[in-house]
Amino acid sequence: MYICRKEDRLRSFIKYTLLWVSQNLSIPFWTVGHIHLMTTIYEDIIELTMSLGMNIIVGVGFYIGWLDYKNEIKNKK
């Protein structure tokens, strides 16, 4: 049983981290990404991968936040 609790805590921490990053760092991620797109030519696969990774993190966080919000609305009814 202790393992299940530990896994639940880890899952909750990862979910909290994704939500926090998506809510607090989405604008800086997108701002930096757009500035780089406008001022540099993406020839380096690492830069493309990092930009895509940041956008995926923000997108997943927004989706999890939306699911939580939807559940809160359903529970209030």
Image (spheres, helix red, strand yellow):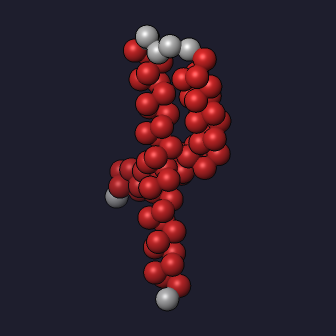
Query: Residue placed farthest to the top in the image?
Result: 43
Image height check: is 55 above or below 67? above
Farthest bottom residue in view? 77
* Residue 57 appears in the picture as rendered: yes
Against 39, residue 9 (above or below) is: below
At x 47% / y 71%, what residue is drawn? 70
- Observer able to see residue 2: no
Q: Residue at x 44, y 31 (%)?
A: 53
Q: Which image quarter: residue 38? A: top right
| Image side of residue 54 versus residue 7, left or right | right
Q: Is residue 52 toward the left or the right of residue 24 in the image?
A: left
Count the marks.
Answer: 0
Q: Position of residue 39 (x, y in %)?
A: 60, 17
Residue 3 vs residue 32, the one in the foreground = 32
Percent position of residue 55, x then y: 48, 37
Q: Is residue 14 left or right of residue 36?
A: left
Q: Residue at x 47, y 24 (%)?
A: 50
In which quarter of the view is residue 52 placed? top left
Which of the image's four quarters has the N terminus?
bottom left
x and y percentages locating residue 6 in the rendered image: 42, 50
Q: Residue at x 50, y 13 (%)?
A: 41
